[in-house]
Amino acid sequence: MRATPDTSARPGTPLLVDRFGRVATDLRVSLTDRCNLRCTYCMPAEGLDWLPKPDLLTDAELTRLIGIAVTRLGVTDVRFTGGEPLLRPGLEDVVAATAALEPRPRISMTTNGLTLARRAAGLAAAGLDRVNVSLDTLDPKRFRELTRRDRLGDVFTGLAAAREAGLEPVKVNSVLMRGVNEDEAVPLLRFCLEHGYQLRFIEQMPLDPQHGWDRDGMVTAEEVLAALRTAFTLVPEPGERGGAPAERWLVDGGPAVVGVIASVTRPFCAACDRTRLTADGQVRNCLFSRSETDLRALLRGGAADEEVADLWRANSWSKAAGHGIGSEGFSQPSRPMSAIGG
Ligand code: SAM
Ligand code: SF4
């Protein structure tokens, strides 16, 4: 569905404001919907119907849109994701072009880490500031079952390479699921403390293409915290949380911290500062939006930068107050997480 929002009440600011007073400054860019893992909660074993190649933004189109976001719309943070962003051959060039923008945004990436060992140094040199590596289990057999690939060792070497390349802090993202890996909260935190990685647990959201999510299968933030407290003392980290989704806790007095992202049980929609660009050039104002705005067609139709910026602003203006998971009338977006950009 395409958005045609009414913007008559929108104030005349260049920023990505919405009707609820939020300002989007954090851009998530999906570089591809493809992946070299098949995490059971994200993709079926056979993969998905990948986006057709001609629909994908070229590196030049992508770089132009990121430039518009940073120089005209006030975006200060750019995160590359997917699918698996390391599958995009031109990634280093896109990162370098992003780092050359004025004002320079902070640049990060969310990755499964499989090929990070050979890319981390080059990406850091191109201007990547930091990474989040997804890792849900430390057990090789479980990793094979969960991701349908035998690649746990590659994630470990990828993580180490990220640290050596100075991509600080190296964060680890974990999703716990009942009956799958719910017993790994403590081992995952021990592992991250030992290696100097910053761990964040993320509640599982209804974004899987199989529509298999159910609330009871999700391990809640409260359950994660209870499990961690059996082995560590956790004290809320002092200071403002701002738009950051993670609630952060000092572990055993600090300085190490652990984050918990309670996207479902304690949504942070009221402080959301995100806007999203899919690999095929659609802007979304929420992971869960039911509509998106086609910037690719505009680019390919010869539109000027300010015209593109205006359509992006209109998309933000139409952002809903919250995702509404659990409320009557909630329905999953038709795009799965891997095609939106997690
Ligand atoms: N392939 C990269 C990776 O795995 O880090 C980037 C894309 S992946 C979709 C981004 C993050 O979304 C991963 O940390 C993954 O665990 C998480 N994720 C995927 N499906 C999810 C869901 N239904 N709920 C919560 N997180 C999910
Ligand atoms: Fe791939 Fe990331 Fe989805 Fe796993 S979570 S299948 S690594 S896109």
Image: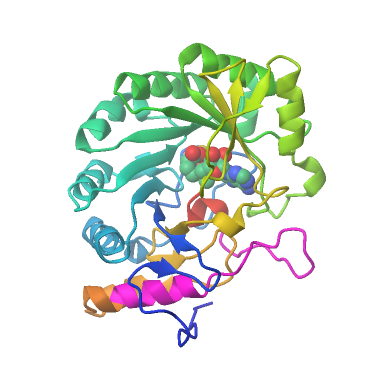
Q: Which residues, given as a range, are shown in magenta?
A: 308-336
Residue visible at 44% across and 22% down?
154
In this rendering, the answer to whether 328 lies above or below 311 is above
In this rendering, the answer to whether 124 lies above or below 274 is above
- Expressed as whole percent of the image width and height from the top left, the position of residue 299 reads 27, 73
Left or right: 241 in relation to 55: right
In this rendering, the answer to whether 256 lies above or below 114 is above
Left or right: 90 in relation to 266: left
In this rendering, the answer to whether 199 lies above or below 104 is above
Q: Tell me, yes or no, whether the highlighted magenta stretch contains residue 225.
A: no
Q: For residue 197, say whether it is visible.
A: yes
> Ligand 1 sits in which quadrant?
top right
Q: Tell me, yes or no, whether the highlighted magenta stretch contains residue 321.
A: yes
- Expressed as whole percent of the image width and height from the top left, the position of residue 176 reads 68, 33
Total marks placed? 0
Residue visible at 55% across and 55% down?
271
| Image quarter (top left, top right, bottom left or bottom right) of the N terminus | bottom right
The residue sitting at the top extreme is 194
Toward the viewer: 244 or 68?
244
Q: Magenta stretch mostly in which secondary structure?
A: loop
- Expressed as whole percent of the image width and height from the top left, the position of residue 188 reads 61, 21
Q: Quadrant of residue 277?
A: bottom left
Residue visible at 61% across and 52% down?
268
Please say which color scheme the image uses. Answer: rainbow
- Expressed as whole percent of the image width and height from the top left, the position of residue 100 reads 17, 48
Q: Quadrant of residue 75?
A: bottom left
